[in-house]
Image: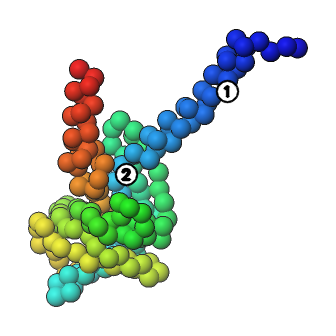
Amino acid sequence: MTTTRRTFVAGSVMAALPLSLAAALAEDAKQADFLFVQTAKGMTFDKAASKLTLEGVSPVTVMFTDRPERIASHMRTAAFVPFWSQGKDSFLSDPPNADISILEGDKLQQIVVTLMDPVLDGDRLSYGVKVLEGEMPAKAADVSVFIDVIGMPLTPLSYAGVARRTWRRAVLY
């Protein structure tokens, strides 16, 4: 069987299509911006040291993206802690904000903080915190921590993300 130039080019294009599609998907996956949720049976807060300790923290941290990706998954909490020190966009250089939600009976208490320096020891996860809004109790049960990466480079709602979207919209319109 002989190969003509036309069949060679067509075959090359068809072979390259899955590779380019995989590359495009990989590029999109790199740009997905996840939000994280951690739950714990309880918490303590040392105001003098600005240290929050989650007691009985789940070994699993839930992660999800907002539109348009709509990806939901989970990861081991032990794998989440290195986000503060690994990678060029680590939380070390730009600590994330978090909403600490405490449900006591029918009363919901929410505190907005900046999280820093996590330390995982068994089922205890400690963070240095800077309280931005609300009053952190010294002790509480049934705690959820919603970690928002807003402000990190290339997140959809960061300045860079807004500028990127504005540029894309200008090009599209």
Q: Identify the residue position indicated by label 1 in the image.
A: 15
Give residue 77's position: percent from left, percent from top.
Answer: 45, 67
Give residue 17's position: percent from left, percent from top.
Answer: 60, 26
Q: Identify the residue position indicated by label 2 in the image.
A: 34
Question: Residue sitting at 22 percent across and 27 percent down?
Answer: 170
Q: How many marks?
A: 2
Give residue 172's position: percent from left, percent from top.
Answer: 27, 23
Q: What amino acid type is highlighted by mark number 2?
A: Phe
Give SS at disc 2.
Answer: strand
Question: Residue sitting at 36 percent across and 64 percent down?
Answer: 90
From this viewpoint, which residue is outermost toward the front? 5
From this viewpoint, which residue is outermost toward the right? 1
Q: In terms of sequence position, does the residue under pointer 1 or pointer 2 come before the other? A: 1
Q: Are marks 1 and 2 in contact (CB under 8 Å)?
A: no
Q: What amino acid type is highlighted by mark number 1?
A: Ala
Question: Residue sitting at 38 percent across and 61 percent down?
Answer: 88
Q: Quadrant of residue 48?
A: bottom left
Q: Nearer the viewer, residue 68 or 22?
A: 22
Q: Decide if residue 149 is in sight here.
A: yes
Q: CA distance from mark 1 to mark 2?
A: 32 Å
Question: Residue sitting at 47 percent across and 51 percent down?
Answer: 73
What quarter of the picture does the N terminus occupy?
top right
The reply, left or right, for residue 131 in relation to residue 126 is left
Q: Is residue 34 above or below residue 91?
A: above
Q: Is residue 23 above or below residue 120?
A: above
Give SS at disc 1.
Answer: helix
Question: Dot 1, crowdedness within 10 Å: few (<14), some or many (≥20)?
Answer: few
